[in-house]
Image (cartoon, coloured by chain):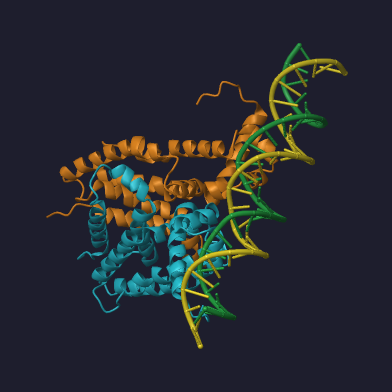
Chain colours: A cyan, B orange, C green, D yellow
Amino acid sequence: MTEARPQTRIQKKNRETILDAALDVFSTEGFRGATLDQIAGAASLSKPNVLYYFSSKEAIYTELLSKLLDTWLDPLRALDAQGDPIDELVAYMRRKFEMSRQFPRESRLFANEIVQGAPRIADEITGPLKSLVDTTAALIQSWIDAGRLAPVDPHHLIFSIWATTQHYADFDVQVRGILAPTGDSHLDEAEAFLVTLYTRTLTPTSD
Amino acid sequence: MTEARPQTRIQKKNRETILDAALDVFSTEGFRGATLDQIAGAASLSKPNVLYYFSSKEAIYTELLSKLLDTWLDPLRALDAQGDPIDELVAYMRRKFEMSRQFPRESRLFANEIVQGAPRIADEITGPLKSLVDTTAALIQSWIDAGRLAPVDPHHLIFSIWATTQHYADFDVQVRGILAPTGDSHLDEAEAFLVTLYTRTLTPTSD
DNA sequence: GCGTTTGTTGACCAAACGGTCAAGTTCATC
DNA sequence: GATGAACTTGACCGTTTGGTCAACAAACGC
């Protein structure tokens, strides 16, 4: 993980350029569909130059994925066990939605990887990801047991938050195609809808 | 569309075999990531033999996609304007969920195509798909106006049904990784959760 | 300035790719 | 069981792919 060599300015800049270009290409073509020539072209570098900074196509992809996984779970970690259950879960949904808004390429990269069987991150899923989700599910269950949330399956609640929020990044083309020529406010409308969806679902009934 | 030539038994069988094998490969690798050798191998045929039945790799993919689009919208078309609004929408969600259960490969094929920008079905999305969705959204809005549904954005309601149901096919690896080693009943639990989610969301409040 | 490290690339390579073809084999029909 | 159509495939072709390498250019430390 730790790079022994101290990075020069040029290294830092070019590595970033390459990663950004590679994110463009990988997120729209998948790993196998992407080519080094595409990446090099998008980065305005020659192919050998790209391979001077990364040992292989796979190395670029792996680095992108590991950086992504690192930040992908932050919204979940930010859940506060002390807060109001409904506020916390709606806020979590909003953070996930914000990630779809700001990092759609990263979301699509992740989607591509999972849809294609997650060959490179299976361990991350059954390991750290599962642990974090299980912990959070237990917290949600404790809120339900305390009568502060309407009863729902915690795991599937989390899945549904993932699905509904990431949908707007991953299926962006479809959403745009159907909503056009509506203005670009559709993401705001989507967020409002999702707030309603989860508020109604989670609010306990009095009886 | 109409095949002038009367298909022989062998043609019918082999074309089906190839399409089934290609569905396996395309749905997990995407169009560019899949190779004719993989498809031929999965179909237990030689590569030239595959190309005897389909003129190109693209022809196989196109045929799969068009067959898929044909059936993909059936659940939406089955919405009955005369039925009870909540029952109809929950039933629609159930039909979509059933498609994820029975045709996960088709769902992933579609997901791959959309995530990668829908280069081959953009027209289908802005045309027939948009029309059908707009019509359905208008129906839902009329139910809301009549006070028979809680107010929600109809388009985003439809999107959320797509997202939540397809998630269990497209992100199957992730769902399994997190729910393991739970038994294989997780799809039943998911469906029950989704029934709850949409029933609570759509039921009008008395005030 | 000057040598050394760092950065850059055209030319190249072996493998894999989509697709072709000629030559053979199997099948249906009479 | 002969004949033509339908089916099958090993060998092959041109291109693209990920990756290498030697030779050159820029930047850095002194």
Instruction: Name the residue at 28% across, 75% down.
Output: A146
Residue B153 on image: x %, y %: 23, 49
Residue B164, percent across and down? 37, 54
**What is the residue that sits farthest to the left in this orientation?**
B207
Determine whether B193 is above or below B138 in the image.
Answer: below
Instruction: Compare residues D30 and D6 and report the one nearer the observer.
Output: D30
The quadrant in which residue A149 appears is bottom left
Q: Is residue B182 visible?
A: no
Q: Where A111 sits versus B61, above or below?
A: below
Image quadrant occupied by the C terminus of chain A: bottom left
Q: Quadrant of residue B131?
A: top left
Seen at 42% across and 73% down, the residue is A132
Most foreground residue, A135 or B200: A135
Name the residue nearer the viewer: A158 or B120.
B120
- Residue A41: x and y, percent? 48, 55
Instruction: Tell me the residue at 16%/46% (across/down).
Output: B147
Residue at 27% over, 39% down:
B134
Q: Residue B191 at what x, y percent from top left?
A: 39, 55
**B147 and B4: which is toward the camera:** B4
Q: In this orientation, does residue A165 appear?
A: yes
Left or right, residue B64 beside residue A201: right
Q: How many marks?
A: 0
Please tell me whether residue B8 is drawn above or below residue A180 in the rendered image. Answer: above
